[in-house]
């Protein structure tokens, strides 16, 4: 995923539009749209951050699912099959984004 934002370019020295590229929830690269100067996070750092945060995210997901199951059991039960299919796909996509 990419988004546009105004940042002070280290190369141009002025406020310009930058493209911020995300891998999962992490910033992977920031590039100035005027001069094309870019800063990229090293892939190993990105993978380390992803692996470091994954257990915490799994724990948070478990807590969220428990809360949903207790507060809206029918809605939770009806959404579970879809989630069980899409969550591994979502995690696979994240891993590809982070590693490539
Ligand atoms: Zn620039």
Image (spheres, rainbow, N blue to C red):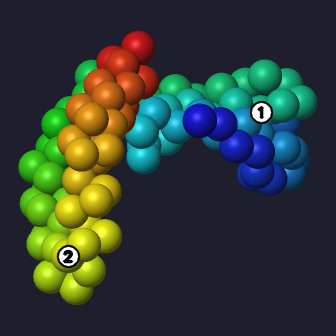
Up-down relation of residue 41 to residue 82 (above or below): above
Q: Which residue is mark 1?
A: 32
Q: Few, some or many C-alpha atoms within 10 Å of disc 2 (few <14, some 14-19, many ≥20)?
A: few
Query: The residue tagged with tag 1: helix, strand or loop?
Result: strand
The disc placed on residue 73 is 2
Q: Is residue 14 left or right of residue 96?
A: right
Asked which quadrant contains residue 94, the reply is top left
Asked which quadrant contains residue 16, the reply is top right
Up-down relation of residue 80 to residue 10 (above or below): below
Q: Is residue 13 left or right of residue 25?
A: right
**x then y, percent, for residue 23:** 45, 33
Q: Few, some or many C-alpha atoms within 10 Å of disc 1 (few <14, some 14-19, many ≥20)?
A: many
**x then y, percent, for residue 32:** 77, 33
The disc placed on residue 81 is none
Farthest residue, direction top:
100
Q: Could you say which is closer to the camera, residue 10 or residue 97?
A: 97
Residue labelled 1 has its Cβ within 8 Å of some atom of ligand 1: yes
Residue drawn at (24%, 72%), measured in percent from left and top? 74
Residue labelled 2 has its Cβ within 8 Å of some atom of ligand 1: no
For the N terminus, the quadrant is: top right
Residue drawn at (25%, 67%), measured in percent from left and top? 76
Q: CA distance from mark 2 to mark 1?
A: 48 Å
Query: The residue tagged with tag 2: helix, strand or loop?
Result: helix
């Amino acid at each position: 995923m990419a988004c546009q934002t105004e940042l002070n370019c280290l190369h141009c020295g002025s406020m310009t539009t930058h493209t911020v590229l995300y891998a999962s929830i992490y910033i992977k690269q920031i590039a100035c749209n005027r001069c094309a100067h870019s800063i990229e996070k090293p892939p190993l750092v990105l993978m380390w951050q992803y692996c470091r945060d994954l257990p915490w995210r799994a724990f948070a997901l478990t807590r969220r699912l428990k809360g949903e199951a207790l507060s809206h059991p029918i809605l939770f039960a009806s959404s579970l099959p879809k989630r069980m299919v899409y969550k591994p796909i979502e995690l696979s996509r994240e891993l590809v984004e982070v590693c490539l």
